[in-house]
Amino acid sequence: MQALILAGGKGTRLRPLTVYTPKPIVPVLNRPFLLYQIEILRRAGVKDITLSLNYQPDKIEQQLGDGASYGVNLRYITEPSPMGTGGAYKYAAAIRETTVVFNGDVLTDLDVSKVIGFHEQKKADATIVLTPVENPSAYGLVETETDGRVRRFLEKPKPEELADLTTNNINAGIYILEPGVLDLIPEGENTSFEYNVFPDLLKLQKEFFAFVMKGNYWRDIGTPTSYLQTHHDFLSGQIKNFEIEKSAEADVATTAIVDKNSILGAGCVVKPNARITNSVIGAGVHIEEKAVVENSVVWAHTRISSQAQIRDAIVGRSCHIGRNSSVGSESVLGDKTSLTDYTKV
Ligand code: GDD
Ligand code: MG
């Protein structure tokens, strides 16, 4: 059993955060995002993991290396140009082996070994993991039969298509595929799992089953709102199965307030009377006198000057927030943004 993580998208919806940091390694609680996926694969005993890359592959490889520090073997494959999700799977297939495929932007604490057990028990050609969501229109909607077979796969349904649907279970972006699926994908062509391969599996009446998640956390982190919400979900204890590294070696003034939810990266400096609540602060961030950071994520090496206020926002790496500035709800500042004193955004 091997794994393939599809991590070649440009992360357009997360811009400007993804201009210098490709989506698979945006920090979540100060750790590169893919480490959460690597962790649940490792727990299920899947240690040979290929990362299928296209956008800024070198940065990803530099960060994660050969995987030895995380107890896995990482292999990197870079497509000459984006091949689509199915095309990337075909392009990466060095050996014909059962493969766990992950979309590289879903955060979940799913027990992957349960899905593997289900796939084997059903003797499936393909198993897709589903999760219920409130608004399925932004995802791949999946209807199933009572025995768990997939009946219909509808990617990004239009409003008129949603009307007669009987489910809000969506494709969670996690599959187990037998190597026979490779034979349905043309060589060297841009092919999508969602628009081509899954509908083909149904047409050809392959053994295509759905495993419905129950009681697990699941989220696609691919938009700023969702990325920020992921942090809040972690800080409020809704995501339980990962160890959270609490604050390390920060220099916090005695009159500064850092609430117990917040996390500070190594080498942060927090000056007198600054206040940090419900926030995640990257390594080497300086927060000066009387500055306020609330419900926000601040990436490494940013400086927040005195009396500045950051609320419900995401601030990229190496930014400079001038004195008395205020960064408001849902703002997303890209790396190296510089705000002069008294700016309001
Ligand atoms: N290597 C490679 N090559 N990876 C790709 C390519 C490609 O050409 N295109 C997309 N990817 C990767 C992205 O990096 C991402 O990790 C994953 O495939 C899914 O792409 P998204 O662009 O994030 O798709 P989505 O979120 O709109 O929809 C997909 O995910 C939903 C769950 O979050 C679909 O699979 C939906 O059916 C699903 O519900
Ligand atoms: Mg996505």
Image (tube, helix red, strand yellow):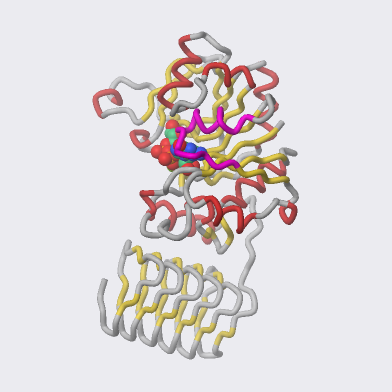
In depth, the one of 125 and 60 nearer the eye is 60
In depth, the one of 111 and 68 nearer the eye is 68
Q: Position of residue 52 (x, y in %)?
A: 56, 40
Is 128 inside the magenta-drawn segment? no
Please give left or right for residue 84 compared with residue 164 in the image.
Answer: right
Name the residue at 50% across, 57% down.
26
- Using the image, determine if residue 47 lies above or below residue 115: below
Name the residue at 52% across, 15% down.
146
In depth, the one of 57 and 32 nearer the eye is 57
Please give left or right for residue 282 compared with residue 292 in the image.
Answer: right
Q: Position of residue 235 (x, y in %)?
A: 53, 61
Quarter location, residue 108: top right
- The region drawn magenta spans 77-93
Name the residue at 65% across, 23% down.
119
Name the residue at 36% across, 59% down.
16
**Residue 133 in sight in this render:** no
